[in-house]
Amino acid sequence: MNKITKKSFYSFLALYLVSSFMFLSLAAYWFYSSQVAMEKNANFYKMNHIADIISAQVIDAHMHHKKFKLDSFQREAIALFDEKQHLLYGRIVQPVDFSKDFYMKNNIFTLVTQRTAGHLHVKYIVVQSDECIKNIEMIKNKIAYAVIITAFLIIVIAVFLSYIFLKPLKDKMQEIEDFVKDTTHELNTPITAIMMSTSRLKTKKVYDEKTIKNISISTKQLYDIYASLSFLSFDNNSEEALELMFDEIIQEDITYFSELLEKKNITLKTDLQQCLVKIAPTKAKMLINNLLSNAIKYSNPNTSIKITSTQTAFVIQDQGIGIQKEKLHKIFKRFIRANSYAGGFGVGLNIVESIVKEYNFHINIQSKENFGTTITLTFN
């Protein structure tokens, strides 16, 4: 990943994690608070229930003149006091404040009740328990473990989602980087040729047809690059469609590329019939320019290209390097090149496809590797 993609990745990841952890913290706090409240209520009712049981036993023993025996409880300390607050039965784990009915001190809850009505001289029933605090501590530990595990899962999911969501951005940034590199390379070749040819003219100070031709070819290459980039960058939908003689535009482009054809020693065969097409002039030019320049670019020297036009179709056939069968479905995608034979940055056929779709034309490509390519453009 480059710097921009990394920055986007970490920004998205940080935002996702911060928001997720805030929600997780709030959820954990709410759950903990509700569990603590429920545990305290349950503990209060449990201690009251124990006090009711003891009170009933005291009253029953007194009414039936039975010997009273205080039951023991596993997690609670029970004590019975007379009206002078002297211990009669049981035990306590810490001093009792008889002025309060229910309170907590030193993590121990204490319940003080007067339900025996003086039977067996018992005035106060005291129940003390630390079970609630232990249960709350267990709840806290469980929630802490759950939060840690959930946080780990959130981090894993966040990284995965960040990668998934930012993959299109990463791919697009890679396309742009490759595009910039390819554009730099494509511009470097004609610019270098122009500079060298100009320097040669200055040195010789005489007219040199070959040098002038090189300058002309390089200038046209620069213009083609500029035209393609302009078509991709600016709105061309405002141009009005006109009825044009497509065969005449083909002939103009053949003249335009004549120097490049001559330089590669490519023979051009034409069979041009009148072809009337309703299309914007700039887009008609872009169609032919891209298809013809590709045919020249990917043709080997000393081969031939055949161009045919009828009333309803335009066909261009070359004897070039061809396209691999498995790559045919990708050639219309922007910045995608079927091979690296002759440079380029993969926008020509994307432009062609966009124009074809706009005017509801039909394009068919048949190609065989190392034998050549035939492109048929059918008009409405």
Image (spheres, rainbow, N blue to C red):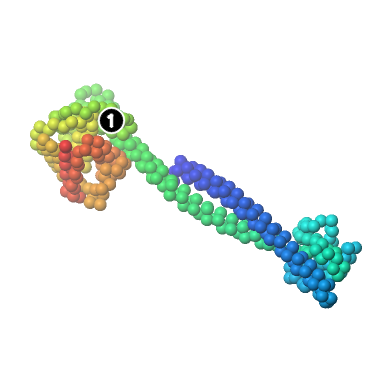
98 and 363: which is toward the camera: 98
Quarter of the rendering containing residue 281 = top left
Residue 26 can be seen in this image: yes
Q: Secondary structure at mark 1?
A: loop
For the image, the number of numbered tags is 1
Q: Is residue 53 above or below residue 329?
A: below
229 and 98: which is toward the camera: 98
Residue lying at 39% horizontally and 45% vertically, measured from the top left: 168
Q: Left or right: where does residue 268 sit relative to residue 282?
A: left
Mark 1 lies on residue? 237
Residue lying at 19% horizontally and 27% vertically, measured from the top left: 242
Q: Position of residue 115 (x, y in %)?
A: 80, 63
Q: Residue furthest top?
A: 205
Q: Quadrant of the C terminus?
A: top left
Q: Left or right: where does residue 121 sit relative to residue 40?
A: right
Q: Is residue 137 above or below residue 333?
A: below
Q: Left or right: where does residue 237 sit relative to residue 172?
A: left
Residue lying at 11% horizontally and 35% vertically, measured from the top left: 311
Residue lying at 62% horizontally and 60% vertically, measured from the top left: 142
Q: Left or right: where does residue 187 sit relative to residue 246?
A: right
